[in-house]
Amino acid sequence: MKSLNIRKNQNGAATLLTALVLLICITLVILLSSKSVVMETQISADNYRMAQAVAAANAAMDFGVGYFDQGGFDQVINATGVAGSDGIVDTIADRTYTSGDGTQTTTATLTFNNAAGTRCVAAGETPNMKSGMITAVGYSDDGLAARTISQCVGTIDVFGGNGPKQSLISRGGVGLTGNYKIINRYNNTTAWSGKAVNIGESASASTYLRPVGTEEGDYTRAQLEDDNTGNAYTSEAVSDRNKGNGVDTIANDARLSSLTGDEFFNNFFYGDRETMYQLAESLDQVYSAADIGSANGKSGVVWIEGNATMNGGTYGTSDSPVILIINGNLRATGNPDINGLLYVRGQLDAAGTVEVLGSTIVEGDSALVPAGEDPVVGHGGVDLIYTPYTLDKAVNPIIGTTTVISGSWRDW
């Protein structure tokens, strides 16, 4: 009877042990679950921060490519912030990006590198402002995550290595009758024509070269491009009404006059008309002849469709030149100032004072030029000053000609 009571007192021990084991298991499950939730939360937060950093880096890279496309690596004088070129790669301020609801702000740094020996510029190559590497580093809103991306950029050579070397080039004849001067202190020719250049038709006309016995290196760029020809130190008159055409004028060149219109065009540009049209279109710089005034102040490739009248205006600058293509005839009145290349498919009629710092090319399409007239005419003043620095030797890229080097993207 006594042993029976002992067994009764031990009833429930197994239940208690089982309950303890289950409690411990539940506790462990809760702890592991909590740790898993914490880990997943941390992973999600890290992924979110990294996504923020990647987005900031990509936004900065897009800004960098767009900035480069507007004039290369040297557009702003670093010390003063004045627009222009100083020969130093620009320093870009940190970029800041705020979410639409204003609750989050990410940042990014942007650097340009045109040094030789990088993966974008070969060792031994002379650095310039028209090619190099853009590096963007994006940061999350708390600054804990960072992502670096880089890529190489360059420019399309719109002249295909065959930029003009004369102040005036015409596939047909030149019959200016007004006051004009054609200056080329870089090379030995001022005008190149497929037919006659009738300088004797002008009341006051002269062409000018660098004085005999001097070299290009004897002058500053400003002196080489000066429109003042009164100083014998920098200018020597070669052709005029009394002397006739001098050695600086190439006239009646059958090789030039025999070219078709497309051949003539392609002789100066790396691509055909459609390619140049697309470059202008990519910049939203294709205008009708009636809307030519909208091109005033523009740089880069500009395409004007139809017979146009240009009444004054400034096109391009010496640091940011224009390639102005008139797909028709052009009558210039007022005092238009063009820095770069003026290409006219039909006839150029200089009724006003036209100044071109660079080169003027006139195709003289017979379907457009009035019957019996030369492709280049005009009784106004014409100042054509040759410089390669608004053409194929432009220090900065011509706007709209940027190209991203294929295979150069790095995000590691």
Image (spheres, rainbow, N blue to C red):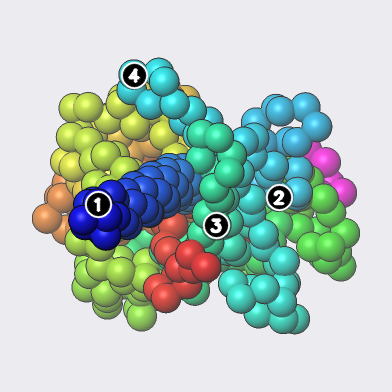
Percent x, y of residue 170: 38, 60
Task: Give, as a three-letter code, the residue at label 3.
Answer: Thr
Q: Residues within 10 Å of mark 1 (few under 14, many from 20)?
A: few
The residue nearer to you, when weighing 217 against 128, is: 128
Q: Secondary structure at mark 3?
A: strand
Q: To which residue does mark 1 refer?
A: 5
Instruction: Tell whether label 1 touches label 2 (CB within 8 Å).
Output: no
Q: Which residue is mark 2?
A: 89
How far from the left and from the top, in percent, is residue 277?
24, 54
**x then y, percent, for residue 402:** 44, 57
Residue 61 left/right relative to 357:
left
Q: Quadrant of the N terminus?
A: bottom left
User: Of 344 and 129, which appears nearest the observer?
Assistant: 129
Please say if 152 is above or below 45.
below
> Marks 4/2: CA distance?
36 Å
Q: Which residue is mark 3?
A: 148
